[in-house]
Image (spheres, coloured by chain):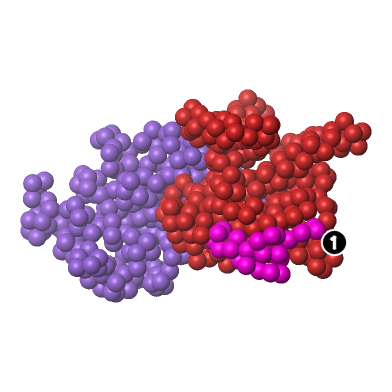
Chain colours: A purple, B red
């Protein structure tokens, strides 16, 4: 396939003291793919995410986003390059409203500077109005427009998850990284989430990489899966291939299948 | 939009100014009241600007007296030694303080929580020691013979400017970015917010207005001494902010007014003053741990009441 690669990880490692949390990981993700990243607890999944988003710098190896190296870039610069994420433990801006949470994502593309806001120049009003309208439109898609002025901390759990995904998407990423989006959800909510993830990929034409423990969700929604164990990729393939892979079964899926 | 409400508020403020000015002119308000009013203005400037750093951006800074002293000394030097006009001196003081904020902020804002507090506290003390050992500005005995330029008019309008500027920042994408940094730094950064830049913005702007308050106070009390800018001063400002409610400009203004008045009226009972003062602080923290208006957003309360009208505004 001649599709463009959105993410390319070359021999990336992250070493904490004597621990190789992520060890010589290679990954290639094409544009528009929906890829899962699974592995037992402590396998290094979230550390790998943190490498991809610039929270940590790789100790060894390189990571390319859209063909550009992310080495030495700060998280906000990587977001500008086109990768947005959600967090394993929800990190919303609790004391801000639903609307404001999403509007934060537009800050990096703000057309009006601090100066024009202080002096309330016309560009301030134009810029703010545009942000507001965009955010409201956006929240409509996620059926959160009824709660624009609600504080994020007061939303029920499922809606907080949805808001976090909405906020990440508002940053207009080409690559969306979801860290355990189904954690703490009941089966019905998980099914809804599965549909939402598929729908997001088709609607926004973006690439999604998700970490998940819920096998039903990963196997049901992902086209390709990477399996991480002890910091290393031990398998890669379609859900069917992963199910049949003896290494994976041994490391992780043993009881499940 | 927000324009109408804004101009109403400004008009109200100017009416208030005119009434007080009239009362001063008619000698209904004597010097004692004018002293209190000017002090109120200075304290509000200090508290509202510190609130931008501590309340909105969530960076625990307690070196505000240091920035204030820079504004005070630089502006006093400009009027006493260089005979420059007051406005130029104020601007000079503000810019010097802002520059200090930039120089201090860039390295220290990497620190978080208690560590930042200690670094800023240390900075405040260093500045004070510098003044103490500089003969040019009088050393320990302080800088004398500063002309009394500050009056009710200066205090009032500069307070107004401070509040308007801080509010204009807070109610914009830049303010939201600062609040996002306070709420969750990692999430803010992953949403594309340049965290370092916004911390430095908050720090520099906060320092700028602290310098303004310093310039006003230097030109009201004739003399400035290093001891008036010790860490107790920084804590005093911090108490205004915390009591009023971190992250609420209205609350901080209210808290500052209440505490300043309380402190002034208690001056007749010096032995009881600190006891009552601390008692009030303790009680506030027990019954309103988030400050007087910490969990109340006046704008949102008002908005809820006028919901239908607001919606009409959006759709049109």
Residue at 77 percent across and 46 percent down: it is B155
Range shown magenta:
B123-146
Could you tell me if residue A200 is visible in this image? yes
Please tell me which residue lies in front, A248 or B173.
B173
Of residues B22 and B164, the one drawn nearer to the viewer in this rendering:
B22
Q: Position of residue A11 (x, y in %)?
A: 25, 73
Q: Residue B125 in magenta?
A: yes
The N terminus of chain A - image quarter: bottom left
Decide: few, some or many residues near mark 1? Use Cα within 10 Å; few <14, some 14-19, many ≥20: few
x and y percent of residue B97 in the render? 66, 61
Give me the residue at 65% from left, 27% from top: B306
Residue B18 locus on image (x, y percent): 86, 36
What residue appears at the point 56 percent right and 63 percent down from the top-left corner? B126
Residue at x-position 59% and y-position 31%? B272
Where residue A176 sits: x, y (%)? 38, 55
- Which one is nearer the viewer's eye here, A102 or B301? B301
Mark 1 sits on what residue? B85
Q: Is residue A255 above or below residue A66?
A: above
Tell me where residue B163 sits by quadrant: top right
Give the letter of the chain under mark 1: B
């Amino acid at each position: 396939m001649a599709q463009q690669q959105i993410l390319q990880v070359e021999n990336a490692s992250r070493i904490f003291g004597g621990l190789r949390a992520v060890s010589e990981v290679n990954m290639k993700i094409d544009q528009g793919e929906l890829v899962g990243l699974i592995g037992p607890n402590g396998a290094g999944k979230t550390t790998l995410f943190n490498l991809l988003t610039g929270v940590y710098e790789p100790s060894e190896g390189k990571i390319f986003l859209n063909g550009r190296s992310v080495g030495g870039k700060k998280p906000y610069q990587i977001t500008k390059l086109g990768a947005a994420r959600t967090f394993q433990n929800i990190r919303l801006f609790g004391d801000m409203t639903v609307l404001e949470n999403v509007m934060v994502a537009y800050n990096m593309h703000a057309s009006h500077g601090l100066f024009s806001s202080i002096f309330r120049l016309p560009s301030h009003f134009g810029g703010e109005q545009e942000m507001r309208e965009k955010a409201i439109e956006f929240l409509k898609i996620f059926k959160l427009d009824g709660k624009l002025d609600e504080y994020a901390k007061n939303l029920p759990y499922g809606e907080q998850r949805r808001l976090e995904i909405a906020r990440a998407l508002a940053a207009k990423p080409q690559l969306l990284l979801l860290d355990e989006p189904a954690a703490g959800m009941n089966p019905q909510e998980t099914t809804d989430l599965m549909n939402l993830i598929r729908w997001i990929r088709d609607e926004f034409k973006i690439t999604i990489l998700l970490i998940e423990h819920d096998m039903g969700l990963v196997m049901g929604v992902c086209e390709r899966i990477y399996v991480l164990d002890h910091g290393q990729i031990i398998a890669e393939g379609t859900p069917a291939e992963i199910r049949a892979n003896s290494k994976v079964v041994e490391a992780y899926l043993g009881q499940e299948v | 939009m927000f324009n109408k409400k804004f101009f109403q508020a400004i008009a109200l403020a100017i009416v208030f100014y005119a009434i007080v000015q009239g009362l001063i002119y008619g000698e209904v308000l004597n010097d004692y009241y004018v002293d209190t009013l000017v002090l109120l203005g200075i304290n509000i400037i200090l508290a509202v600007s510190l609130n931008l750093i501590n309340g909105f951006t969530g960076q625990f800074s307690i070196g505000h007296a240091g920035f204030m002293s820079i504004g005070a000394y630089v502006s006093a030097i400009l009027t006493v030694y260089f005979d420059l006009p007051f406005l130029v001196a104020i601007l000079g003081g503000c810019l010097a303080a802002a520059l200090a904020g930039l120089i201090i902020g860039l390295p220290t804002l990497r620190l978080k929580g208690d560590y930042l507090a200690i670094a800023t506290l240390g900075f405040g003390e260093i500045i004070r020691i510098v003044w103490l050992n500089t003969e040019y500005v009088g050393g320990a005995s302080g800088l004398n013979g500063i002309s009394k330029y500050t009056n009710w008019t200066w205090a009032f309008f500069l307070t107004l400017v401070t509040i308007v500027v801080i509010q204009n920042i807070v109610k914009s994408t830049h303010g939201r970015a600062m609040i996002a940094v306070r709420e969750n730094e990692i999430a803010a950064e992953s949403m594309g917010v340049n965290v370092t830049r916004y911390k430095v913005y908050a720090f520099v702007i906060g320092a700028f207005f602290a310098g303004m308050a310093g310039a006003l106070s230097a030109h009201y009390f004739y003399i400035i001494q290093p001891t008036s800018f010790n860490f107790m001063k920084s804590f005093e400002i911090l108490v205004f902010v915390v009591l009023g409610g971190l992250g609420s400009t209205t609350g901080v203004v209210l808290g500052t007014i209440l505490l300043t008045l309380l402190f002034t009226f208690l001056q007749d009972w010096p032995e009881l003053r600190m006891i009552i003062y601390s008692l009030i602080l303790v009680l506030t923290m027990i019954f309103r741990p988030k400050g007087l208006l910490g969990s109340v957003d006046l704008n949102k309360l008002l908005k809820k009441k006028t919901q239908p009208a607001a919606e009409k505004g959006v759709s049109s």
